[in-house]
Image (cartoon, rainbow, N blue to C red):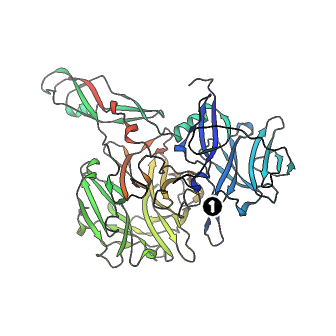
Amino acid sequence: MKATDRYQLLSYTRKPVGIYEDKLANSMHLAYRVNDQPFQALNHNTGVLFARATENENRTLNAKCLTSPYIFELDNQAGYGVVAIRTEPDGSPDPECKGQVLLYTTTDFLQYKEHGLIDLKTDNHVRYVTCDYLKNEQKYCIKWCDKTNQTYQSLFSNIDDIDITPTSAAPISSSFITTPIEGAQPINQIDIPKTIFDKLFERLTVPENIGVDVPEEAVVRSIDELKQVKANYFYSDDTSVTRSVDWDTSNIDWSKEGTVTITGEVKQPTFYFPLSLHRADPCIFKDQDAYYFIATNDADGNNSLSVRRAKTLAGVATAPEYEIINTSMYPHMVQFLWAPEFHMVGDDLYIFLASSPNGFNEIRAHVMKLKKGGDICNKNDWEEPIPFLNQHGEVLSEIGLTLDMTYLTTNGRHYVVWAQRDLIPNDLGSWIYIGEIDPDKPWQLISDQVLLSKPDFSWANNHVYVEEGPYPLFIGDQLMITTSSALVDYTYCVGMLSIDKHADLLDVSNWERSNYPLLTTASVEGECGPGHNAYVQDDEGLIWNTYHARVEKDGPRSSGIRRVHFHKDGFPVLDLTDDKDIQEKYRRLNLSVTIKPH
């Protein structure tokens, strides 16, 4: 690309079609073009800005969407704004905001500051809205057309302190934008600088392997030295990943000095989805000897949990299973063995899991400890699971479900994060909470529980109000927690919470939440409703995402594994498929080796 290239950004919504339903289609989507090329969708042609639900006095939520998202520049190059119309999920007028429109500001079109609703001082619903900064007047001009087809406008100076004085205005001129993007309903386009374009393209497209660098020759004295000759793989997002190579040493005589050309294959397993049918909520734990795979067992109605043990990460796909718990073992755990996770807390290994003594409404988080020196795959080496308690020694929640509990530690403090669905006096759906624990008693809080997130974005309450499945991922100074939302069907998707790991984790104001999901049915062909992630680091230092999805819309929940890539800023890429991770032509490598015997 040249310095004279022109970069444009298109804002659009989509027509709801098939499984891309109203709650997804009625959001702001983005597309780009360079010079006069056709617009190309970003983020798999899915939304990047969604309206939040409103909350009733009884804490239940009312799902909302947005239409007509109009993007504009702010004054003094301070960033960009978005005005949009808040609607009901089906796009019909929202009775809660008659005569009002949404306002957001952003510096990068990735994270947005919500300014709430602008009161246009009209009694009619708004059909269309625009906003532009008039450089000559040094004022913003907001224009809108209401349901009676009357057009009004108002000027204001401060985006953070808007006072509307409506006056009649000429009709808003239509901009005819054509695009081949499936289902697109264009709103408007603006020019953006290359710096913004580069960041958007990096974050909202999937990188791919574009090259590999391996030394042309190496001088070694042993197999161990040869193993240190690695390959560096380059990606289109200007990142690289170093990998080990399995070098073929069959032509090497280690007793003689000489030079020989050898071949090798990059040391990274290939996983095909599904890894395991009818296994949901997968989690892999690694110790110094092996990898251990565990997952919710949908095949037997969630009545047992089994562990697979393998020497390699790839080996968990075919390793035998060893049952470690079932619903006939303990009277307080007779149904719903759900979402098991391995966690080392101090020097002890635990499984955090959920179960119930009496039906769906009494599903509770539990903690199960491995006996000292015990065998992970031996049922008899696990202690009886303990129901998780609050700081007062009582059941964590008496008015609903607690499940999907995960564990993390940072700055010498220890925390659990979990999903909680309060049912009394009203069903609120599943929300995400955090609390601090004592590592010597990881089955009890030592703090109040703090609400981190609720399913208020329309992608998070699609078909049902659910946010669940939290799991931590530490990258540099950032703690990221991925969560899963919507119904556990083809609408299931993955969002993210993030925080500086040195900050106070119990202060919700320190957390940042992604406005759009990172992984959806649109992300990877053939994987419907992906979610409930966990992460494991392999012997090479690579991080892998374990998740479940469905092969087809109505297929069984099944486990998958995929490498997590990271952009330069540390942001995770969850949809880098194997073919884009390593091109086939770069899997096998050549090396000229000179042997220098001891």
Name the residue carrying label 1: 53
Q: Is residue 351 visible?
A: yes
Residue 123 placement: quadrant: bottom right
Residue 552 placement: quadrant: bottom left
**Residue 550 image offset from top left, x and y in percent:** 40, 55
**Residue 82 image offset from top left, x and y in percent:** 69, 46
The residue at the point 75 percent across, 44 percent down is 131
**Residue 304 image offset from top left, x and y in percent:** 30, 68
Counting every numbered tag in the picture gives 1
Q: Is residue 343 visible?
A: no
Numbered disc 1: secondary structure: loop
Q: Is residue 565 above or below residue 454?
A: above
Give the camera-side residue of 34 and 2: 34
Q: Is residue 331 above or below residue 370?
A: below
Give the camera-side residue of 226 and 458: 458
- Quarter occupied by the C terminus: top left
Give the camera-side residue of 417 and 185: 185
228 relative position to 466: left or right = left
